[in-house]
């Protein structure tokens, strides 16, 4: 079987060649990996004998530790092990909001796995938005060889300017509607990309009395993200996939998540939770998303044509989240349940998450990509709280107008 | 053909026929729309709807599979080859219990698969009873093959006497409750190859983070402590064991009033009182899926010394169960009434059949390792239960609306039908 041959033909160490400089700028010296990143600047490699997860055998090496032999003058059969080929990835990243951090982590993960990355952030480098994380930390990306550029997704060619290397993969972590993503997708196809990945949203799932949201469930057909998914499915690229995230925690986040809870807990304030408090949601550490995306880049055939719920594999109740945050802060949780209508507040403004069960499970990633969730909220939140205190946010002067309004409403005697 | 398939074919005349995965011979493809069935040496192949063929490492022996398409799913259909468990040589099976619910279906599957099955019961319930939808021929065949060993498993000495020299090589312990009940069986059966135990997801420690995975913390103080003790005891013995943890089991002939409780109220056009928000999430698993899972683990080395959650592929809220039951029985959308249980004293009576908390498990371990896929969706499964049981006028527990009336009165809600 070709597999046995490929194992025999893999060579390490002495026969591997150090990568020369390439336009993508990901010099081997910039990464911690040994000299196993072979890349031909001349022709691409034939992608025959592609061993992916679809054979159910765990060929789970993540890009380092496996070399491959090149076909050189009819010498050895070129074998592309699932994780062995280096990809050139373009990430089109949003300049704000909850998804911004995905591009930051994914860039890092991809580089660690031996790929080269360009991240194009929408807008201008000089904009005020760039003062917030993760953008304020893009030097961390440049230090590991990621090219950072700014521009408009409607004209990627212009935005990318002098960056020559054709991209194997384009990851759109920006658009929510077809008018924004279409030019990116079209450009990717026209410029030879083999794979397009789209960050969609688990918010497009239709509510049902059954849980959780599973890939394949009904979605709102006219949702912008869905229309993009439809477009990508018909585009005719070698591989496409859509990732539907939920809420994220993690270093470099552009949008508050656990911070909302820490703001209250660190000040010994009660945490107001819309009743009944048992609503289940999914808070993932962003590394779960970046690891899933990296796997998809490395297993384009396994990922092709798939929707992936991009989140951890456990849900948490609202009350449970408060308790974990309190524990992370070394404090007692004080929870007050309220009815938003009765308290005269808009739940969307008073609370950071959708006031309902909003819970998806990452079943496709597990079965198709062999992905595993590493989110451990109890531990992750400890880390996040330490960071929260380190930057002095527990001392910041914050107004809690809506909370106060709720607490007042709740403390009033209820009519019999 | 397999009993369950015949039963299903009768129950769901409008739906596409669903293939049962048990049994060796007389396998027919479920529908013309499906890919050709795999046979023989292509053991354990799974054909995904995007065309990828997934080879799973199969068990010893030849698996015969059927490609089945999930009925009623309007999106992303997933064609699955369900592997049969019948590849093993015939075993001499001792089943503790087997005359009440799970065992009724499981024993039949095992007999059909060619094993010799002996039910150990006190004889209080009939040893065999014809299942709703089971043909006379099938029932006669089963009755002629299944054996009975009469005794009280709580009488440990008597049990050992009865088991001495019997040569059972497999035990299915369906009704065990306490760890100490296992010892006499193990002592009496030196040739035992596998002890398969029906445990319960009730052993999991209540958590705010869900679902429960097999590796999660268990609660040594739970009501199901005995099940946990049994698992622990089995782990300490040398015999190969497998433990199955179901959640809420449902299906025709359920003696636990799960769906029955809802059907009683729906039938009378009564409002359905659900405690607190009705958002509590739980999980129902069809008894036939559970029986198949039990068959899957038989002589399956992968399953040795392993625990598996077995239940439906999806979870459901309390309110959702009410709605699903209404759909299943062809009733109009139910009126659901929420109440605070703390405002009432129901005495010894249970005002609601399910524990008032989130309670659901991940079945991905079984799906991955055992090639187990729950066949029944929630509404499909409840329809099966309704058509074969409650809808025919049969039930285990008569309707008792006394707690309902207490609730409705306090909330000032009138029932449509005079009490």
Image: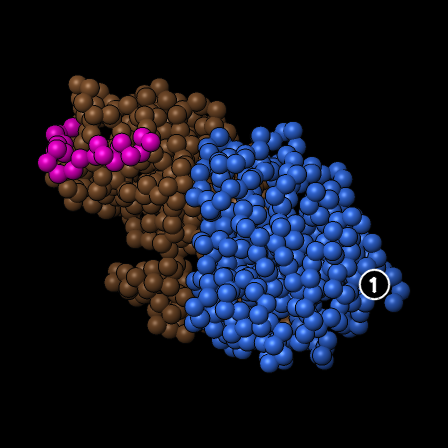
- The hue of chain B in the figure is blue
Work out which quarter of the rendered image holds the C terminus of chain A and state it: bottom right
Give the vertical position of B67 relative to B191 (above or below).
Answer: above
Residue at the spot x=69%, y=58% of the render?
Answer: B146
Q: Quadrant of residue A323?
A: bottom left
Residue at the spot x=70%, y=42% of the render?
Answer: B1
> Could you say which is closer to the camera, residue A243 or residue A394?
A243
Q: Quadrant of residue B70?
A: top right
Q: Residue B123 in the image: x percent, y percent?
A: 73, 70
Q: Residue B416 in the image: x percent, y percent?
A: 85, 60
Q: Residue furthest left?
A: A14
| Left or right, residue B362 beside residue B323 | left
Give the vertical position of B222 relative to A42 (above or below).
Answer: below
Give the residue at mark 1: B415
Work out which quarter of the rendered image holds the N terminus of chain A and state it: top left
Q: Residue furthest front?
A: B165
| Left or right, residue B23 beside residue A98 | right
Report if residue B395 lies within the magenta region. no
Residue B33 visible at all: yes
Segment colored magenta? A1-22
């Amino acid at each position: 079987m070709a597999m046995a041959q490929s194992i025999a033909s893999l060579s390490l160490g002495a026969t591997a060649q150090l990568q020369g400089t390439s336009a993508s700028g990901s010099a081997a010296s910039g990464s911690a990996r040994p000299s196993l990143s072979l890349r031909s600047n001349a022709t691409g490699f034939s992608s025959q004998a592609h061993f992916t997860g679809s054979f159910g055998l765990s060929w789970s090496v993540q890009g380092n530790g496996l070399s491959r032999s090149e076909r050189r003058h009819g010498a050895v059969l070129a074998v592309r092990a699932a994780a062995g080929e280096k990809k050139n990835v373009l990430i089109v990243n949003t300049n704000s909001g909850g998804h911004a951090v995905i591009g930051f982590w994914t860039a890092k993960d991809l580089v660690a796995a031996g790929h080269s990355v360009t991240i194009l952030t929408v807008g201008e480098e000089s904009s005020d938005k760039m003062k917030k994380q993760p953008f304020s930390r893009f030097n961390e990306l440049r230090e590991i060889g990621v090219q950072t550029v700014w521009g408009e997704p409607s004209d990627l060619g212009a935005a990318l300017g002098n960056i020559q290397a054709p991209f194997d993969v384009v990851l759109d972590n920006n658009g929510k509607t077809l008018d924004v993503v279409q030019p990116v997708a079209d450009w990717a196809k026209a410029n030879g990309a083999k794979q397009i990945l789209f960050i969609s949203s688990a918010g497009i799932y239709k509510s049902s009395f059954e849980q959780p949201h599973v890939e394949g469930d009904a979605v709102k057909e006219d949702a912008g993200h869905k229309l993009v998914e439809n477009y990508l499915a018909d585009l005719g690229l070698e591989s496409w996939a859509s990732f539907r995230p939920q809420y994220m925690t993690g270093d470099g986040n552009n949008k508050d998540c656990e911070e909302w809870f820490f703001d209250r807990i660190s000040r010994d304030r009660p945490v107001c939770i819309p009743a009944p408090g048992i609503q289940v949601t999914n808070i993932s550490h962003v590394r779960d998303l970046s690891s899933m995306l990296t796997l998809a880049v490395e297993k384009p055939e396994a990922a092709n044509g798939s929707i992936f719920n991009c989140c951890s594999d456990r849900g948490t109740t609202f009350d449970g989240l408060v308790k974990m945050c309190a524990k992370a802060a070394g404090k007692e949780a004080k929870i007050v349940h309220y009815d938003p209508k009765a308290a005269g507040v808009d739940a969307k403004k008073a609370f950071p998450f959708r006031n309902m069960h909003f819970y998806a499970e990452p079943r496709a990633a597990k079965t198709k990509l062999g992905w595993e969730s590493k989110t451990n909220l109890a531990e992750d939140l400890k880390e996040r709280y330490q960071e929260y205190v380190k930057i002095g946010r527990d001392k910041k002067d914050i107004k809690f107008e809506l909370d106060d309004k709720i607490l007042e409403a709740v403390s009033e005697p209820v009519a019999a | 053909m397999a009993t369950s398939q015949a039963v299903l074919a009768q129950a769901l005349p409008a739906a596409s026929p669903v293939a049962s995965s048990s049994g060796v011979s007389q396998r027919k493809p479920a529908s013309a729309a499906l890919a050709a069935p795999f046979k023989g040496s292509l053991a354990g192949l799974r054909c995904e709807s995007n065309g990828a063929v997934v080879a799973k490492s199969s068990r010893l022996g030849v698996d015969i599979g059927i490609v089945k398409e999930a009925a009623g799913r309007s999106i992303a259909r997933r064609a699955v080859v369900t592997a049969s468990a019948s590849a093993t040589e015939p075993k001499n099976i001792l089943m503790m219990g087997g005359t009440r619910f799970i065992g009724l279906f499981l024993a039949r599957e095992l007999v059909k698969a060619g094993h010799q099955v002996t039910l150990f019961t006190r004889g209080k319930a009939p040893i065999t009873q014809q299942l709703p939808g089971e043909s006379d021929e099938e029932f006669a065949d089963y009755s002629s093959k299944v054996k009975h060993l009469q005794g009280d498993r709580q009488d440990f000495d008597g049990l050992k006497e009865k088991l001495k020299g019997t040569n059972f090589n497999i035990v299915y312990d369906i009704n065990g409750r306490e760890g100490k009940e296992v010892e006499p069986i193990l002592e009496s059966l030196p040739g035992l190859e596998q002890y398969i135990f029906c445990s319960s997801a009730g052993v999991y420690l209540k958590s705010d983070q869900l679902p429960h995975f097999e590796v999660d913390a268990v609660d040594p103080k739970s009501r199901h402590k005995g099940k946990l003790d049994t698992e622990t005891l089995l782990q300490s013995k040398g015999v190969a064991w497998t433990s199955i943890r179901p959640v809420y089991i449902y299906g025709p002939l359920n003696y636990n009033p799960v769906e029955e409780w809802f059907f009683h109220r729906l039938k009378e056009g009564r409002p359905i009182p659900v405690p607190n928000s009705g958002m509590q999430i739980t999980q129902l698993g069809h008894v036939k899926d559970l029986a198949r899972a039990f068959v899957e683990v038989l002589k399956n080395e992968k399953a040795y010394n392993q625990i598996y959650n077995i239940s439906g592929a999806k979870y459901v809220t309390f309110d959702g169960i009410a709605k699903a039951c209404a759909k299943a029985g062809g009733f109009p959308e139910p009126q659901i009434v929420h109440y605070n249980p703390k405002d009432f004293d129901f005495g010894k009576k249970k005002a609601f059949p399910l524990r008032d908390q989130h309670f659901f498990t991940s079945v991905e371990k079984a799906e991955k390792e055992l090639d187990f896929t729950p066949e029944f969706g929630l509404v499909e499964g409840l329809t099966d239960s309704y058509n074969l049981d409650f809808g025919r006028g049969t039930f285990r527990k008569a309707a008792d609306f006394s707690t309902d009336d207490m609730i409705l009165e306090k909330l000032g809600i009138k029932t449509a039908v005079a009490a």
